[in-house]
Image (tube, rainbow, N blue to C red):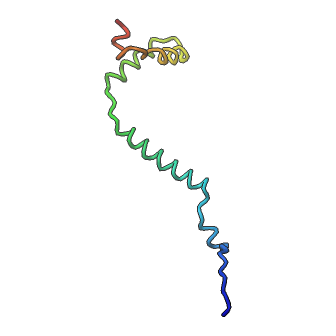
Amino acid sequence: MREVRWRLVPTPASEKRRVKPSHAAWILTALFAVAVSASVYRIPIRVSDSVEILEAVDETPSIAAAFTQGLHARRGRCCARCVRR
């Protein structure tokens, strides 16, 4: 009897349906980004926290000073009211 050997050669049509690893990585990254942004969107923001930040930024002379103040404002302090004491 004659032995038949099958060759697994992808045809051009099946090759187009295949997802490249880089595309799969982008798709997974997009799914994770959507999931994280949806959970962050649901986090409630207290108005008192936002008002204190806006008042602190309003008192600074420039954007750079506000950024620097924001970097150093929360070290070892629980809130903006404790910073003023």
Residue 67: horizontal and vertical position, in percent?
51, 18
Up the image or down, 17 lies above or below 30; here it is below
Up the image or down, 81 lies above or below 9; here it is above
Residue 44: horizontal and vertical position, in percent?
32, 33
Q: Which of 12 and 38 is in front in this view?
A: 12
Q: Which of 67 and 6 is in front in this view?
A: 6
Task: Residue at 66% x, 93% y: name it.
Answer: 1
Task: Residue at 60% x, 65% y: name it.
Answer: 18
Residue 47: horizontal and vertical position, in percent?
32, 25
* Figure quadrant of residue 74: top left
Counting the numbered discs, the total is: 0
In the picture as drawn, the residue positioned furthest to the bottom comes out as 1
* Figure quadrant of residue 78: top left
Residue 63: horizontal and vertical position, in percent?
53, 18
* Figure quadrant of residue 50: top left
> Left of 61 or right of it: where is 37?
left
Q: Nearer the viewer, residue 12 or 56?
A: 12
Q: Which of 83 and 50 is in front in this view?
A: 83
> Left of 43 or right of it: where is 24?
right
